Amino acid sequence: MATGLAAPLVTPDVARIQRRTLRLLFVTQIIGGIGVTIGVAVGALLASDIAGTAVAGLVSSAAVVGGALLAVPVTRIMTVHGRRPGLVVAYLTGAAGGALVVLAAVTRWVPLLFLGMLLFGGGSAANLQARYTAVDLAAPARRGRQLSLIVWATTIGAVAAPNFASLADRTISGWGLPTLAGPFAFSAVALVLAAGAIMALLRPDPLLTARRLASTGPAGIPVPAGPAGTSATPGPADTPATAVVAPVSTARRVAGMRAAWSVVRTRPDARLGIVAVAVGHLVMVAVMVMTPVRLHEWHDDADVLRVVGLVLSLHIAGMYALAPVAGWLTDRVGRRAVILGGVGLLLVACAVAGTAGHRTAWLSVGLFLLGLGWSGTMVAGSTLLSESVPVEIRPSVQGLSDLTMGLAGAAAGAASGFVVEAAGYPVLTLLAAVAVVPLVTLALRPVPVGAPDEED
């Protein structure tokens, strides 16, 4: 019999939901890591073959731009509807891009190659957003470690993926496809599999659950429904035990970059988090994207894929394999300290890679250190950013961070081909090292007393 009162919602078992979410994200990061990295490993080579060395950087940066731009609609979807539909859209967009790159390789049509790489960035956008999904329900003392666990999961697929590029190419060549098209066909299949797993298994949605917890009192009793446009009705994707008191109109109001910036500009820690992630990514992309072209200067066509696979495997191992250590240090010694450590590694990496000459082993060391520096700035910066803003605006702020990171990386990737052609690879590494100066200045700046740094 109706009483006019809403039935109390059951407080979710947060620990159980978080364990399930982490397991699923771990698996899909492996699959997505394979899909994205196989394409990244040969993207510059394919672009160089079709359009020339100078344009290779522009084509490779198209994937970075695509991932950055896709962060805007994906995080808008997440803000209103939760993490699951946003991740699915990103993965499927990446798969569509991989298919278009295969078609571009067949037709040798450069505009189609640009479009395909632009959409292919969706796979990277999904993998990046997954790290934020891991901390929606994480305990404050474990945020760095749990975020880094998902970053680390990419290692399993990503480290092996470049070495599968040659196998994928040989497998697909029997279908009449040109050289270097096979890896992107492989990528498309992997990204579709990741999207299917997220669609089927990411239930309940961790972001929606976190919002429900934020909207309840100390005893887990839901806060009364707000004004018109809010709802306490469970959505079809959520069980009654995890139904969300969903302020739909409020979610839509904060689902944008302008709202995100209005929050970030008043929070020093949030600004530092965004800059750390963006600068670390800029330096990494600038050096990494031209390394296959550098290797091609002294390795013939028959050997270059194997060598590129080995060097990029070491680079990606640096990015992901020690991410749990970066996460542990982030929780133990602090976010700013790990950001500064990452900056130091980036500077050493640029020095080693820039002076390697034609020594493949020395260049491999430089790329490994480059990955370590990226890992420190990415893990510590992402953790600092996520905990520095309220849960209602968090997806939009995270989207702003990924947009900024992607555009910074895209600018570096676009310029890198021209710099290498005009002045050489060592000059590129020198310019990349100079780019970290603003981050050092910001990280060493004292936080004003009373600044709203961290979410209570």
Image: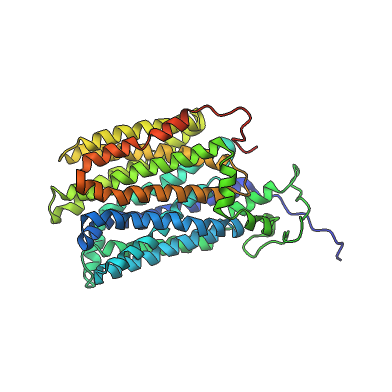
Seen from the viewer's position, the closer of residues 30 and 65 is 65
Seen from the viewer's position, the closer of residues 112 and 165 is 112
> Horizontal and vertical percent for residue 153?
42, 47
The answer to whether 339 appears left or right of 293 in the picture is right
**Residue drawn at point x = 51 percent, y = 51 percent:** 399
- Farthest residue toward the front? 422
> Horizontal and vertical percent for residue 262?
59, 46
> Horizontal and vertical percent for residue 313?
28, 46
**Residue drawn at point x = 46 percent, y = 46 percent:** 150
Q: Can you say which quadrant of the picture contains the C terminus?
A: top right
**Residue 269 visible, this orientation:** yes
> Horizontal and vertical percent for residue 219?
76, 43
**Residue drawn at point x = 56 percent, y = 41 percent:** 265
Looking at the image, is 143 positioned above or below residue 100?
above
The answer to whether 28 appears left or right of 238 in the picture is left
Q: How is colour applied across the structure in the image? A: rainbow
